[in-house]
Amino acid sequence: MSTIRRYIKTVLSVVHGPPSRIIKAGSALALCAAAIGVALLSMAIDRSPTVSQSTTGQSSRATQSSHPLTPGAPSSTPASPSPSSLSCPGNPMALGVSRTIEIDTSGGPGFGSMQFTTKLLSEKEVMLTFDDGPWPKNTPKVLAALARHCTKATFFPIGLHATYHPELLKQVASAGHSIGSHTWCHQDLSKSRGRCQSHGGTKVVEYTARDEIEKGISALQWAAGGAIAPFFRFPALRQSPGVVSYLGQRNIAIFSADVDTMDFKLRKPELVRKSLTEKLSHEGKGIILMHDFQTATASAIEDILGDLKAGGYKIVFMTPKIPVMSIPDYDQVVLKELTPIPRRRLVNASHGAHD
């Protein structure tokens, strides 16, 4: 500011002088204007907010730390940018991942408008989820389609199925997808007696909700070869207040859905694809519920991903802030049940009612 005052004083002293001094005054005026501009710019910069940026992939992201995390809320850190077509070799129309949300599962928050009100997604954003796997042929088809699109999903496998095919669940984990849980044997947790389809047969079983949940987690941890996400989906989306409370105590988030394809009833790839397209068009966004257990879904998934891309939808991937830890007593229970599987063929028809 002292420089500006000096230039102004010079101009005033020469304004009534001879032409040569007036020319000098003109130069001084120009310098004065420039100095004022620099000073104003410096003041603006000093008063602007500070945004910390880091580079991820091909673009930068801002890290905002003005709002602390609250239990059950997504992380305030914006997600990683979507990979471009260049980062997905062979598929210029790849979906990629638009952003990743880290979920704080403290207290057992719930997501999915079919049963909860928490908002996670913006318009045209979807989360891909698959239930009831892992299963031969079908799960590998789903994984291959996701890989071709360089995108991610969350799987909710059945613990018993994972003990049949631990190598498949390891493939899910190694591909970087999130693995939640879907009970040990797909039982209705509001009841204590049911039928468990095991090793190609069906048997009547008595159980508690805690047993079903914890055996499922232990089995999945064993099959995956490491900790899984504290994400849970109720079989058939049948919740009960007591079980919701228990999951809250375990800090396990509950995932319902916004778009249920009902693929377990449709059984034809074209019908699964049509169901998803119509329901998602109505909802505009949401958590999509499918089954990697179902042959129709495995056959339709490549076209479904293409439809999502063509429709302008963006994939959001959910990851946990911390994993869930299994309970040692249930780890031992599961290990005792890892008996050799009968050689008779296991077919989807014996599990067709799973939803």
Image: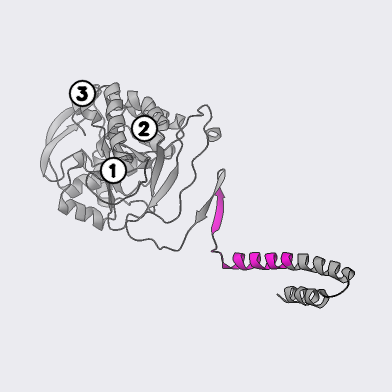
Q: What's the residue type where badge 3 is placed?
A: Ala
Between the C-alphas of marks 1 and 3, the distance is 22 Å
* Disc 2 to disc 1, C-alpha distance: 15 Å
Q: What residue is disc 3 on?
A: 349
**Amino acid type, mark 2:** Leu
List x then y, in percent, for residue 86: 56, 33
Which of labels 2 and 1 is toward the front? 1
Specify the segment rendered in magenta: 33-56
Picture quadrant of residue 338:
top left
Reading the image, the residue beneath label 2 is: 168
Looking at the rendered image, the quarter that the C terminus falls into is top left
Is residue 162 at least partly visible in the picture?
A: no
With 313 as the anchor, is 20 left or right in this view?
right
Query: Magenta includes 262?
Result: no
Q: Residues within 10 Å of mark 2 (few under 14, many from 20)?
A: many
Q: Is residue 48 magenta?
A: yes
- Figure quadrant of residue 310: top left
Res. 114 visible in picture? yes
Q: Secondary structure at mark 2?
A: helix
Q: Residues within 10 Å of mark 1 (few under 14, many from 20)?
A: many
SS type, badge 1: loop
CB atoms of marks 2 and 1 within 8 Å: no
Nearest the eye: 307 or 177: 307
Separation of marks 3 and 2 at Cα, in angstroms: 20 Å
| Mark 3 or mark 2: whose residue is earlier in sequence | 2
Q: Which residue is mark 1?
A: 181
Tag nearer the camera, 3 or 2: 3
As displayed, is residue 313 above or below residue 298? below
The answer to whether residue 12 is above or below residue 172 is: below
Q: How is the image coloured?
A: one colour
In the rendered view, does 226 fall on the left or right side of 184? right
